[in-house]
Image (cartoon, grey):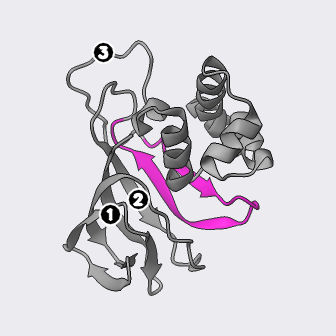
Amino acid sequence: MDEYRAEVKELQIGQTIRQLRQKQRLTLQDLSQLTELSKPLLSQIENDQVIPPLATLLRIAKALKVPLQTFFEEEDNTQKCLVVRAGDSTRMHRRPAHGGSPQPYYYNSLAYGKKHKHMEPFLVEFDPARTEECQPVRHPGEEFFYIIEGQVQLNHGGETYILDAGDSVYWDSNEPHSLKALGDKIARGIAVLYTKN
């Protein structure tokens, strides 16, 4: 647990959110109304007690009128080319649920530290032991997902798609969508998000 908390604090997502909120003279109540997220959850996020799911981060980014990558970049990094080595797994974090229960997948930013990105690439790992339904999310932008291994179910709009290793899918994020693993094997894939604020 201590190791997990140390990793959460390392990202400093909560600190970044608080700084942006205060800079815009918004209260937690204001941010709660803009994002439709509870004040207790936002407080936990700002205090680095939990790492928010990507969908929650997208809501916060939209409310604060900043790109999603704001939460995954370093202030002094102006590199034009960023290499993330395979052995660098320190950015892998599990998504805690709002109520503290496990979520069905992990994500790892593949371009952590790169400023001014127009895309946000992630390595996503789905835990087949956590097959509870995710609530569909929607946000401005587009997404691309390539399945490396395992089997994943994508619900998009009113359609359901079963994706196997080697399959890829590109979708409009404005439509409600959710992803989950199928079967009893780990599913892994590369997700690339392009968000519009």
Please tell me which residue is depicted at 39% across the width and 27% down the height of the picture: 113
Identity of the residue furthest to the right in this view: 40
Q: Residues within 10 Å of mark 2 (few under 14, many from 20)?
A: many
- Element on which disc 1 rests: strand
| Disc nearer the start of the sequence (3/1) | 3
Vertical comparison of 165 with 44: above or below: below
Q: Which residue is mark 1?
A: 189
Image position, residue 122 (x, y; %): 36, 50
Say what amino acid the circle numbered 2 marks.
Answer: Val
Instruction: Give me the disc on residue 78.
Output: 3
Tell me if label 1 and label 2 are in contact, CB under 8 Å: yes
Vertical placement of 157 versus 25: above or below? below
Region rendered in magenta: 89-111
Q: Quadrant of residue 119?
A: top left
Front residue of 35/9: it is 35
Q: Which label's residue is closer to the chain start, 1 or 2?
A: 2
Would you call the spot at circle 3 few (<14 residues within 10 Å), some (14-19), or many (20 or more)?
A: few
Task: Name above or below for residue 118 compared with residue 192.
Answer: above
| Amino acid at circle 1 | Gly
Q: Is residue 111 visible?
A: yes
Is there a contact, CB below 8 Å, between mark 2 and mark 3?
A: no
Question: What is the spatial separation of the Cα atoms under label 2 and label 3, in whole angstroms?
Answer: 26 Å
Residue at image mark 2: 124
Secondary structure beneath label 3:
loop
Helix or strand or loop: what does disc 2 sit on? strand
Left or right: where does residue 146 sit relative to residue 183?
left
Q: Position of residue 30 (x, y in %)?
A: 70, 37
Q: Quadrant of the C terminus?
A: top left
Q: Residue at x 58, y 24 (%)?
A: 20
**Which residue occupies 21% across, 21% down?**
80
